[in-house]
Every structure is written in structure tokens, then in C-alpha cells.
Image: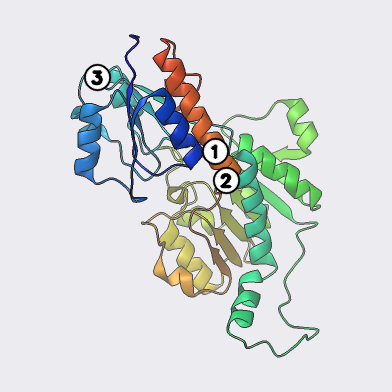
Amino acid sequence: MSSKRLSVVVTRRLPEVVETRLKELFDVTLRDSDTPMTREELVAAVQEADVLVPTVTDTIDAGLIGQAGPQLKLIANFGAGFDHIDVATARSRGILVSNTPGVVTEDTADMVLALMLGVTRRIQEGLAVMQAGEWQGWAPTAFLGGRLGGRRLGILGMGRIGQAVARRAAAFGMQIHYHNRHRLRPETEDALQATYWDSLDQMVARMDVLSVNCPSTPSTYHLLNARRLKLLKPSAVIVNTSRGEVIDENALTRMLKAGDIAGAGLDVYEHGIKGNPELRNMPNVVMLPHMGSATEEGRVEMGEKVIINVKTFADGHRPPDQVIPAML
């Protein structure tokens, strides 16, 4: 690479310390408004930048990449997920893609347990009563939930986050089960005291809590479809902090309304940012606005990984967190 400072366009507001460091290192265009770029703004960005730093709210598809100028050589995503980027098209155009894996593992796993507790201990119902000023005092049979201890937890996707969830759940006395594209090494399985299921159907039918922690890929789209959701026990709870498209949200909504599933804790949604409107009126559903990775520490660490990826590229090397075909 030449000594000329790279032109970098950042599509969203990032933590101030991250933006400042980017400004020190590169010729950076920062965003004043904390709103997603329009399609027109994204087109202008890929036509002028050497490096684009997008987030999950940006759709970097084949059509957009096709309008990129020849100078665009790196898409340094701020986030671990990259299903919003057409990596194959970028690769065919000689554009590298990087992400920020690992830094949100602990934060997301914390949120999984928070959602489990929120549903099983009826925290949302208690909050609603208190906020409405309707609490009439303690009663022996009021707001009875259930313990996590002793329940079987099925983890769908046993990568970094899935394993972090398993460690936390074990501390609550839960029994750990999992389904994954590849079985874990025996020593890892033993350390987590986790039972592997080759058949997702068989696992789903036996679990008390199901946590979705797999990435969004063509093979995981509606992996939990209507047929598979019907295998869940009526007393089961489902938690999703991964990607909304993994679950058929309309089928999930119907089953929750019918009492075929006891409850759900959702941080991601299949259709838009609001989720199915009917879910918002259900006392047994805890809904969060994609907060799983929302800690100050996590956001700064994500930014630091972006900086390392861009700086390594600027120095003439491949980014350490490059997305490769085997990851797709």
C-alpha cells in the first residue's frame, strides 16, 4: 500500500473513542446522525471510499457492490455477523470482507440468561404491575414462575456464544444439551457436561428451554419452522439472541397465542425491527430491541477490532478477521 492515508467511510455513529482513533489513523468520513444510511448514501460511499465500515443495519448486496468504485478494497464490518453482506460478490470483485468476532460473546450470553429469567420468573408481568401502580401487596400464589435449576437447556449452535451460555446455565443447575453442525471435541464436551444430539428434532422435543445461538445462513433460515416448533413441549420456553430468520416468527406467534409454547424471550425478529405486533401484547413474551451485545465495553472492543483490520490492510497485509468462504 502507498503512504497515502486510506479513505474510510463509517456508516453509523460509533463510540467516540473509536471514531477519534479512526480519525487519527485514516482519512475518515464520520456520520453526524445516528441513523442508517439511505441506499443513495451507501452508493456514494462505495464509490468514494477505499474502506467501508458498515453495520448490521446496512444491506451490502450484489447491487450495491456492483456500483462500487475500483478503489474499494475492504468492507470492515462493525459486528460479528455478516449475513447482510454479499461476501461472494465482494470476493469476486476483489474486495475483502472482515468482521469482529469474539468480542460480544460474554455480553450476548449474559442476555440469554437474562431472557430465560425474564420469561420463567415472569419479570415482565411484575414490571408492568409496578409501573401501572396496581400492586396490591405480596401474596403466596402471586406471580409464580419456575426455577431454571433442573431444567434441560437445548442450545442450537454451540460456537463461542453457545458455549458461554452453557457455562452460565450450568451454574444455574441446568442440564446442557446441544445441536451443532459439528460435534465438539470430547474434552470440550466433558468440560461443559454437554450432551450432543445429532437429530435436532429429537433434541427439541425433549428440552425445557431452547436457546438459538446459530448464525443466519441459507441452511439455518426457518430452521425452527412450524413443524419443528410443534415438537416443543407446551411447557417449553424459547430464547433467540441470534437472528430472527432462524425462527418462523408467524408460526411461533400462533403457538404462543394458543398456549402450545409456554413463553419466549426475543432480542431479534424476522420481519423488521418491531417484530410481529401480536407478540407485544403477550405477557409470556419478553421482547428487547437487539440489546444482546449492547455494552460499552463490547462496542469499544468491536471498534478496536475494526481498527486493527483496517490498519493491517493499510500496512499491506490481510485483515486478521477476514471472512473466508469456509465461514459462509
Kind of element beneath mark 2:
helix
Q: In x, y percent, where is residue 20?
A: 45, 34
Residue drawn at x 74%, y 49% is 169
**Can you identify the residue that label 1 sits on?**
300
Between residues 32 and 281, which one lies in front from this camera angle? 32
Is disc 3 placed on a helix, strand or loop? loop
Q: Can residue 179 be seen in this view?
A: no
Residue 29 lies in quadrant? top left
User: Is residue 270 visible to the viewer in this orientation of the structure?
Assistant: yes
At 44% across and 11% down in the image, what residue appears?
A: 317
Instruction: Name above or below for residue 242 compared with residue 47.
Output: below
Q: How far apart are marks 3 and 2 (CA)?
A: 33 Å
Horizontal and vertical percent for residue 123?
Answer: 66, 70
Q: Which of marks 3 and 1 is in front?
A: 1
Q: Which amino acid does label 3 sit on?
A: Gln
| Residue 213 located left or right of residue 186 | left
